[in-house]
Amino acid sequence: MASNRDSGSRDTGSRDSGRDTGSRDTSSRESGRDTRGFASMDKDKQREIASKGGQAAHEKGTAHEFTSEEAREAGRKGGQVAHERGTAHEFTSEEAREAGRKGGQAAHEKGTAHEFTSEEAREAGRKGGEASHGGRGGGSSGSSGGGNRG
């Protein structure tokens, strides 16, 4: 069946008046779902079109450039939603370690890394040791060990 869209017989005045005087099939309106427009497309088609728009904006030089604070906030919101939906990635300890290593390396290269005091480093090491040993005290490296430290 030929579409009115293809034949050019659509009444252009009907859009402005809010009434559709064309002979379009009314089954989509009766079912409560319109078959036209961006919102009616499946998610993959929407993503494809949005991606093309983003690429064009970058080529044209009009794309929004996120500041690091905006990017951080967007990531935080996205992660929060993913956790609420139960779709967030659950990192293994190895993945988390690798992500932390990469982040630390990038921060050092940019000159934005936190410089630990010796006390902060000692405390971080103590906590890391506890975590890796399942919270067991271990005795030899604890401050209550009675060894000769000096």
Image (cartoon, rainbow, N blue to C red):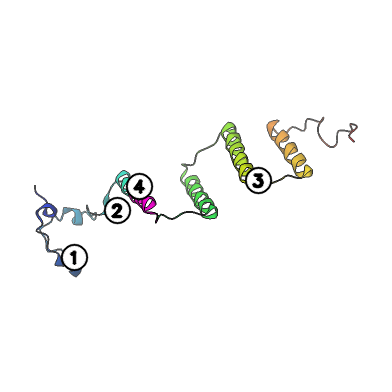
Marks 2 and 4, the one that precedes in the sequence: 2
Label 4 CA crowd tier, 10 Å (few <14, some 14–19, many 20+) = few
Contact (Cβ within 8 Å) of mark 2 with mark 1: no
Marks 3 and 1, the one that precedes in the sequence: 1
Q: Nearer the viewer, mark 4 or mark 1?
A: 4
What percent of the width, then of the height, locates residue 80?
Answer: 51, 49
Q: Which residue is mark 2?
A: 39
Which image quarter is the C terminus in? top right
Q: Nearer the viewer, mark 2 or mark 3?
A: 3
Q: Which residue is mark 1?
A: 15
Q: Is residue 143 left or right of residue 64?
A: right
Q: Which residue is mark 3?
A: 113
Residue 51's disc is: 4
For the residues marked 2 and 4, what is the alpha-carbon distance in whole angstroms?
16 Å
Contact (Cβ within 8 Å) of mark 4 with mark 1: no
Contact (Cβ within 8 Å) of mark 3 with mark 1: no
Q: Is residue 91 left or right of residue 24?
A: right
Q: Is residue 134 left or right of residue 60?
A: right
Element carrying mark 1? helix
Q: Amino acid type of disc 4?
A: Ser
